[in-house]
Image (spheres, rainbow, N blue to C red):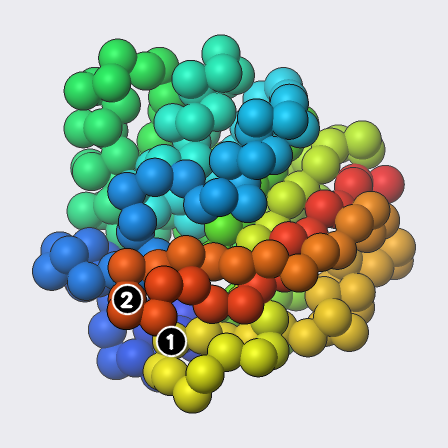
Amino acid sequence: MPEREPTSHERGAEAWWDDSYRDRTAPWDIGRPQAAFARLADEGRWSGAVLDAGCGSGEHTLRAASLGLPALGVDVAETAIAMAREKAAARGLDAEFALADALHLGRLDRTFDTVLDCGLFHTFDGDEQRAYVAGLAAVTEPGATLFVLCFRPGAPETEGPHPVTEAELRAAFAADAGWRLADLQESQIEVILDIGSFPAWLLTVQRC
């Protein structure tokens, strides 16, 4: 059992994040980058040192590494990190993976130019979101860019999504927290469930 307090999502699900990887039921683990993030990579929007927060089995970290960018993926799920390292070795990619808590990113004692968040922000409650955003500020300098792909309202009734409203995103990444919202688009998060995808926001935020 992890030596940390469970997150609000873990308490609600009565399961640790690692459980979804050990029994291979993580619906977000589609075996490739999310289309929205793949497009950003193809457009050259990722640059410099890259942090993939809540990296899961590593597809976005590995995509960054394939572009020649120094990339670190972090997650609290040991099984996911092991899977990511196996993928990196199999693909011959120089990507770094570490077991780390996204609610305490400052402990990394590093800074990054690009931060990727695919499906992490929306798993946190209000207090956790504030701690997470503060941690993001601790690992970025002014001019850094954060890309967030998170659930938005409009999904069918299911136990999966934790939708985030536009107002909540704007409040979380406000100027007084050290951020500037550069772009907000409607998007999709692909899943391995029959539904195929859920409505999402694709958020681009710049560190002030």
Task: Give the quarter of the figure containing the C terminus.
Answer: top right
User: Residue 119's mark?
Assistant: none
Badge 2: few (under 14), some or many (20 or more) residues near its Cα, within 10 Å? few
The residue type indicated by label 2 comes to: Leu
Quadrant of residue 106 within the rendered picture: top right
Snapshot quadrant of residue 187: bottom right
In this picture, is 6 found above or below 208? below
* Residue for point 22% across, 28% down: 87
**Residue 127 image-quadrant placement:** bottom right
Q: Residue at x 57, y 79 (%)?
A: 154
Instruction: Give percent across and percent down for residue 59.
Output: 36, 36
Decide which of 13, 185 is in the foreground and name it: 185
Q: Residue furthest bottom?
A: 157
Q: CA distance from mark 2 to mark 1?
A: 10 Å
Q: Is residue 89 above or below residue 15?
A: above
On the rendered structure, is 153 left or right of 11? right
Task: Tell me residue 148's x, y (percent).
Answer: 61, 51
Q: Is residue 47 left or right of residue 10?
A: right
Q: Is residue 138 visible?
A: no
Q: Is residue 13 left or right of residue 109?
A: left
Count of numbered badges drawn on the protein: 2
Q: Looking at the image, is mark 2 or mark 1 earlier in the sequence?
A: 1
- The residue depicted at 54 percent of the width and 68 percent of the height is 199
What percent of the width, then of the height, locates residue 19?
A: 18, 63
Q: Is residue 182 above or below residue 67?
A: below
Q: Are marks 2 and 1 in contact (CB under 8 Å)?
A: yes
Tag 2 residue: 193
Q: Identify the amino acid type marked 1.
A: Gly
Q: Is residue 50 visible?
A: yes
What residue lies at 38% left-to-right and 27% top-to-bottom? Answer: 62
Q: Look at mark 1 in the image and give the residue it sits on.
A: 160
